[in-house]
Structure formats: C-alpha cells, structure tokens
Image: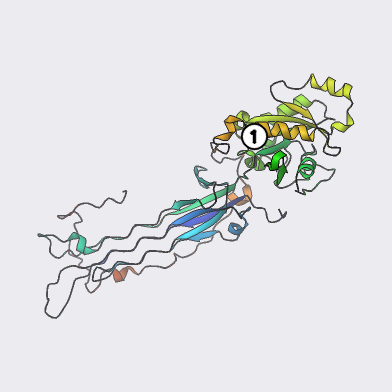
Amino acid sequence: MADSNFIDYVKILCRSGKGGAGSRHFYRAKYVPKGGPDGGDGGRGGHVILRGNKNMWTLLPLKYRRHVFAGNGQSGSGGRSFGKDGEDVTIEVPCGTVVFDSETGEYLCEVTADGEEIKLLRGGRGGLGNWHFKSATNRTPRYAQPGEPAIEKSVILELKLLADVGLVGFPNAGKSTLLSSVSAARPKIADYPFTTMEPQLGIVSYRDNRSFVMADIPGIIEGASEGKGLGLRFLRHIERNAVLLFMVPADAADIRHEYEILLNELTRFNPELADKHRVLAISKSDMLDNELIAEIEHELPAEIPHIFISSVTGQGIAGLKDILWKAITDDSNRIEPMTITHRPLDGHHRVREEDEFIFENEPLPNPVDDEEVWDDEEWDEDFEYDWDDDTEPIDFSK
C-alpha cells in the first residue's frame, strides 16, 4: 500500500433523484372534442447504490468525489406516455466498507462481499398522471400527482480491512518485523516509535498450501482511547479479525501489565473485541535464555495461549503459525468470523478533518421544468383539487 494512497475514512454527500411529475393532459383530436384525460406518469428518480469491489483496497476515489448525485425522473406527457426514469449512480467501494450517518453517527449498512449491492438512497417515485383519477363522477380530473422529492444525506464511509489475524501491540513491539518475516509484505521498519502509520496486510503461508491473512496496525499506547498517540483510529481494522495476536517485547518491564493495558484499550474501543480469540506472543525472545523464559512464564496470564518468538532468528515462528491456525479454524470462527456489532460513531471514533469538511452548494442535476407538467391546459386558480375524489389514496410508503 502506498503511504499517500490508503484512505480508510471519508465523508461524502449523496442525493437520490426526485420523481418526475405526472401529466395533466387531455386527449385532443379533430372529431373527438372530449377525449378525456390521458396524462402519463412521471419517471422515478435514480437510486444511489453501493457495490463491493474486491479489486479496491482504499477509499481514495471518493476523496476527490465528494458529491454523488443520481438523476431526476422526467415528467409524464400526453398519450399516457411515462417519463423516463432517472439514472442510477453506483459507488464502487472496497469489501469491508461500513456506512454511518455523518450527523447522528448511526450505523446504516456495510458491504462485505464482491459484487454485493446495497441501495443506500432510494430515488423518489414518479407522480401519477391524471388518467388514474378519472371516474364516472369525475370525467375531467384537472390534477396530477407531483413526484416524490429527492433524499439527501451526508454519510461517512469507514473501511475495515478483512483479515484473519490482527496484530496488537505497543510501538516497536516487533509487529512489522513479524509480518515481513512470515509474509511477502514489506512494511516500514525502523528503531523509532510509530514507524507504521497505516495498516498493512500480508498473506501468511501454512502447511498443505493453506494460508491466512494477517493485518498490522499502528501501535497503540496507554490512553489511546482518550486520543493519545495515534488514538484508536486504526483499531477499526481488527474488528473483523477472527484472532487477535498481542505482541509484547521480551525486554518489557512488566509483560502482563502491558498486555492488560492493550486489552483495556481494545475493550474501550469496542467491548466485543474482548470476546475474540487471543494469543500472546513475546517477541525479541532471542535475547532470553531458558532460565529467563521459565521465569517469565510464571508471570504470564494463564487464560490465553502464549509463545516466545524471534522474527530475526525464526524462533517459535512455526509454533506460532500452528497456534494461530488452530484458533482461526475453531468452530466459533467457522460460521461468521466477520460478524460484528458496529458501534455508532462518537468522538473517539471520528476523524476530525473529515467531520469538519464542508460541502459546497451545487444545483440539482437534471432539473425538471414543472411548468411542463400541465400540458395544453392552464392552471385553474379557482379550482379546488381534491385528491380523494372517487379515488383510492396513494400510499407512497409501500
């Protein structure tokens, strides 16, 4: 992933198309002086549709396409001619994209599969022409329905990477080094904190031509839930992981305490993360001898499996793969490993620069000339338009 191209959080303005107005036309012919109403229906407005695309890995295209507007439906005309439907707009997004209402932070929908389509905003239905309202007692209905209005909503798209194993640890815990040693990924590695600024993915090979996906996120520190360091912005990328791999370096002052700090920060971000399978890896174990390893083991938490590894020498890497594969293929992860309850966006989960983005005003696309609705007839200001005269009420909620 290029450092400048990975975008996982973007705010856009969407607007569906409004429905076309029904026509109030009357049939006219040389020898048919009272041909009756024949106004056609208006076309429906265009939908705004989300579609998953497995070939996309970033929301970068939407960073430069802030306005997504569908086409409006055209008005009906005489001869029961229906108006043309508005053009639908399809937004291609990476698999794992979640949509939230930018105003309330409410969860709306998510796209997880390639080719999956979700109707984000429904286009307005077209109005009925006056021929629908004719009856034995109302031969010349001089009214028609207007189209349903467009729906406008600003939404936040949040990308959550799909992976089997998520790496969790403090800065410089050896997460990027492990990813580079077990996969073909080449994350940035250096001897200063927060080397990894963006999530990285790698495919880890296993026995019998099997493999699993590992995700590395930037390091978190104590107080990240309060905005310290990089905060909790990137923890969204491990919400879908089946297994969480906690990494604590062997030279840490208190390995158990650091593990508890990491678990506490994850729980504050999303309590459901505490229910996932967890594995503890003590990295940089090439600095330890057998006596120190035995001493450290007595201090480790007993509720989760642990292993001593070294990404440089390869110590414990094969055993780590075995533990991870066993956790991934556990019965609890086979049914719906990616299912999570999406928490609503709040102050800890938002990106400030996106929330403060202000959309410029743009005119409605394909405006409909409402004066053309009343074909060949002039509006009667003194006429009282009774929509329920001998007709069934039209329920747009269906």
Query: Can I make out residue 247 in this image?
Result: no
Residue, disc 1? 328
Which residue is at the front of the view, 30 or 185? 185
**Eyeballing the image, is 338 above or below 277?**
below
Q: Residue furthest toward the left?
A: 137
Where does residue 313 sit, x and y in percent of width and height? 86, 37
Where does residue 4 sit, x and y in percent of width and height? 71, 56
Q: Residue furthest toward the top?
A: 298
Mark 1 is surrounded, within 10 Å at the Cα level, by few (under 14), some (14 to 19) or many (20 or more) other residues, namely many
Report whether 279 appears left or right of 117.
right
Amino acid at the residue labelled 1: Ile
Residue sitting at x 44%, y 53%: 121
Where does residue 335 sit, x and y in percent of width and height? 54, 35
Query: So how many labels did they put on this image?
Result: 1
Which residue is at the front of the view, 278 or 231? 278
Report whether 374 appears left or right of 255.
left
Q: What element carries label 1?
A: helix
Q: How is the image coloured?
A: rainbow
Picture quadrant of residue 88: bottom left
